Image (cartoon, rainbow, N blue to C red):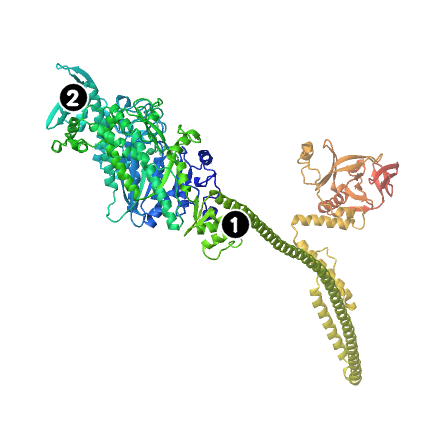
Amino acid sequence: MAKMEVKTSLLDNMIGVGDMVLLEPLNEETFINNLKKRFDHSEIYTYIGSVVISVNPYRSLPIYSPEKVEEYRNRNFYELSPHIFALSDEAYRSLRDQDKDQCILITGESGAGKTEASKLVMSYVAAVCGKGAEVNQVKEQLLQSNPVLEAFGNAKTVRNDNSSRFGKYMDIEFDFKGDPLGGVISNYLLEKSRVVKQPRGERNFHVFYQLLSGASEELLNKLKLERDFSKYNYLSLDSAKVNGVDDAANFRTVRNAMQIVGFMDHEAESVLAVVAAVLKLGNIEFKPESRVNGLDESKIKDKNELKEICELTGIDQSVLERAFSFRTVEAKQEKVSTTLNVAQAYYARDALAKNLYSRLFSWLVNRINESIKAQTKVRKKVMGVLDIYGFEIFENADNSFEQFIINYCNEKLQQIFIELTLKEEQEEYIREDIEWTHIDYFNNAIICDLIENNTNGILAMLDEECLRPGTVTDETFLEKLNQVCATHQHFESRMSKCSRFLNDTSLPHSCFRIQHYAGKVLYQVEGFVDKNNDLLYRDLSQAMWKASHALIKSLFPEGNPAKINLKRPPTAGSQFKASVATLMKNLQTKNPNYIRCIKPNDKKAAHIFTEALVCHQIRYLGLLENVRVRRAGYAFRQAYEPCLERYKMLCKQTWPHWKGPARSGVEVLFNELEIPVEEYSFGRSKIFIRNPRTLFKLEDLRKQRLEDLATLIQKIYRGWKCRTHFLLMKKSQIVIAAWYRRYAQQKRYQQTKSSALVIQSYIRGWKARKILRELKHQKRCKEAVTTIAAYWHGTQARRELRRLKEEARNKHAIAVIWAYWLGSKVRREYRKFFRANAGKKIYEFTLQRIVQKYFLEMKNKMPSLSPIDKNWPSRPYLFLDSTHKELKRIFHLWRCKKYRDQFTDQQKLIYEEKLEASELFKDKKALYPSSVGQPFQGAYLEINKNPKYKKLKDAIEEKIIIAEVVNKINRANGKSTSRIFLLTNNNLLLADQKSGQIKSEVPLVDVTKVSMSSQNDGFFAVHLKEGSEAASKGDFLFSSDHLIEMATKLYRTTLSQTKQKLNIEISDEFLVQFRQDKVCVKFIQGNQKNGSVPTCKRKNNRLLEVAVP
Ligand SMILES: Nc1ncnc2c1ncn2[C@@H]1O[C@H](COP(=O)(O)OP(=O)(O)O)[C@@H](O)[C@H]1O
Ligand SMILES: [Mg+2]
């Protein structure tokens, strides 16, 4: 749909003009320029009315895709740019919808693109016509017939690598729905001379090369062929390989196509056997041999090849050999055999090869037809496609019989073209009710007549010559022509009787020239007779008929001796004339569609447009004529609806909508535009415009108007776009603003909220604190109240208590007083009764009760059992004071006893000693208290253990009580020396501290007294019994740290040994016997000079002073 709107007419976006009818001015130059311009823009198709001119692009263009097919499908012819598809579509649709048989006539010179065009048409029709399995098979068969025919009928020529060397007409048959049913192919004039000889730079038919390149070894062996092209005389070698052509691959394609078309395998092989036989025929060579009768004779050089051909074809070798050596002519029941010379033998060989091949080709076409023919007998619609050579004009005088025939065919086609075009034109005028005006144009009927006239036409004369008895040569034929056609205005020859050409030396001898509608062509007469005869010696055809190879046999039915026909076979010329006549008849019944192919250059190259070459083709194709014929009446015509649709914008009444019939719309439009009346005519359904200028004026106006409209649309569109944009922006702005406001408000709100929260929290805090304060105040008040109340209650209570106590006391006092009073009253009353003993009894009882209570209480208040515990409960009653003290003492004694009871004997001894010491020194000697804590060890010096005192120890037998070092005070000067002081049970010993030698030994009985001061010193004197042995040296004065212990032990030992209490005198002044003298030892207190150590000093004979700190 989109595309339809883009392009509605051929006139849109035209490069040059799409239709030559519109060319202004019309001449050869403008024509060519237009073609060139379009060609340069890859527009290879141009119309002349309904004729399509196609210029071969020599490159693949992207204009045949399935999309393009769709684009052109069901569209009007002038709706889109010129295209072969438009023509195909038009033809197919009028076939299908209007029930008109169609023919598509494709002409042009070799290499102009005819065959491609025919294939394009077929493929387009195949693409748009019905679908379905059956239909597809038919289509496929029709399309696949092409590769088969091309392999056998096409060859590489200098003009075209794939040049069709035969004319082809194919009828495609359709049913009423337009589905293909089948087809019929007719072939015309295969260029069979190519089989035996090819011009330089050209090849034989493709199939030979394909077979040799593509066949398997097996197949080649079977066909007795070798792969090497150079082995075969019939294959030209200089161009055996064609660029871009893969013969081997093509061979496979062809085999495949044959299969699709319906060839049985054996059929395909038979065909290839014939091809092989033709190839091998070329290798048969002859040599001359003189015979006795003087006639030349030929002989086959190498019979091997012949043998193989015979094996291949199933012909008796001798039969074939004979056929190559003799020629039998039968005339009037007589058989005459003549030998063939070498030249004749070669002629015969080539004739056989050509015939074999061309008959094979015809057989192929028939075979294909058999496959593709419509199966049903229903009425068919037909589309014919004619792909035939165009005019062939070689330079110089190279044109021969073939060109003559071809050009004749083209002349006929031109004739039919003119006829049909004019007829159609005329019919349209009548149909459209337009007045027919005479058209002046060149009618080539006269040329056709020159060639085909049955009495004096060139072909008739040629046949006449060929059949004439006597020597017939090309020269005699030319002579005849000179006589008969001399006056014909389109015939020229050097020997023509026509005085005009008497002097015409430009014409070579043995040539004639025909002025065809497309130009003058000079024909060389040489070979005309021969080619027209197309002679194959009967011996050869008979030999072929004898072949056991069924296909070959069937190709030569005239070889059957039973059907011997003395009548000569029709000449090539007459055959062709007849087939052309049939073709023309056939075409005349159909609606023609023309495709005129033009070759832009001779190089088969893209993008090159050789004007001279194109000019030549335009001329002989009569394209200008074509345009003129087309333009004879009205150059342009168009149905009213599309015309109105296209130009309605040019007039206010018709724009934008015309209500009413299209025709009146167009009338209004043309009136409004003031187009001269003679320039156009109104037909029934179409407007006819006489001059292209008018159309172009309309187009210009339209273009101008379209621009204005475009501007208008643009303006409105821009306005609309801007407005929409603006509205969108506005909308967007509002949205953005709304969003922004929302955002801002949200933010503000959040700020406010948070501030509110802060304030709120402060206020709440403040409030809470206030409340707290209040609550605290209240609490305090409550507490205060409670306290006050408590106090008050306390006070009250205490007051009450006091009152109650007071009351109680009062009551008690009252009671006591009362009791006393009562007592005194009672006593006063009962005094006289109780005075004797009651008081005493009460007293005793009370006392008893009190004592009882005292003891019970004491029991509970007893102090601990430790002897040193000084606690003792206080005394409850004064009168029990002595008891209480006594009790204390008893308790103490008891607990001391308890304590002592725990002691061991040794402990007891120690305590006894301590007790003794206490008795002796307590409160008497100041040194005593410090000794209480010291344990009495006695043996401080361990004499037993010290080896130094061994002797000392040995000297003492008794138990040692004290062993201690003491200071013995020198009586002379008061100085001291250390002495070991030993006390045993009976003696007191002093020994030297160092040596351990006993210095003095005093029996305890001799010790009378021990003196010491009352002070805190360790001095003591041991007084000895006067007159004893020991006393001779006087008393001892010692100082010791263990004075108390020594004194105590000395006391106790003395007591236990002597049963006498040792006298211990404690006094700060006592006398000591020093030999004869008595010295007073005096203790002075307070001398601090020597620190804490007491010092001893001899003051005079009678005084020894000891300073105690
Ligand atoms: N429409 C086309 N597009 C592209 N190449 C083309 C077209 N027509 C022809 N040709 C080329 O030109 C060559 C000759 O075309 P062909 O149809 O065989 O010529 P003709 O049949 O007229 O002798 C083709 O092989 C092809 O390469
Ligand atoms: Mg061709």
Write the residue at 48% across / 54% down: 665
Check the picture and name the quadrant holding the C terminus.
top right
Give the secondary structure at mark 1: loop
Q: Is residue 556 left or right of residue 647?
A: left
Which amino acid, mark 2? Ser
Write the residue at 36% across / 42% down: 421
Q: Is residue 1013 above or below residue 571?
A: below
Q: Residues within 10 Å of mark 1 (few under 14, many from 20)?
A: few
Ligand 2 resides in the quarter of the picture at: top left
Q: Residues within 10 Å of mark 2 (few under 14, many from 20)?
A: many
The answer to whether residue 837 is seen in the rendering is no
Which amino acid, mark 1? Leu
Where residue 179 appears, as percent x and y from the top left, is 31, 47
Q: Identify the residue position indicated by label 2 in the image.
A: 325
Nearest the viewer among 177 and 899 is 177
Where residue 82 appears, as percent x and y from the top left, is 42, 41
Nearest the viewer among 204 and 522 is 522
The answer to whether residue 639 is seen in the rendering is yes
Outermost residue, bottom direction?
829
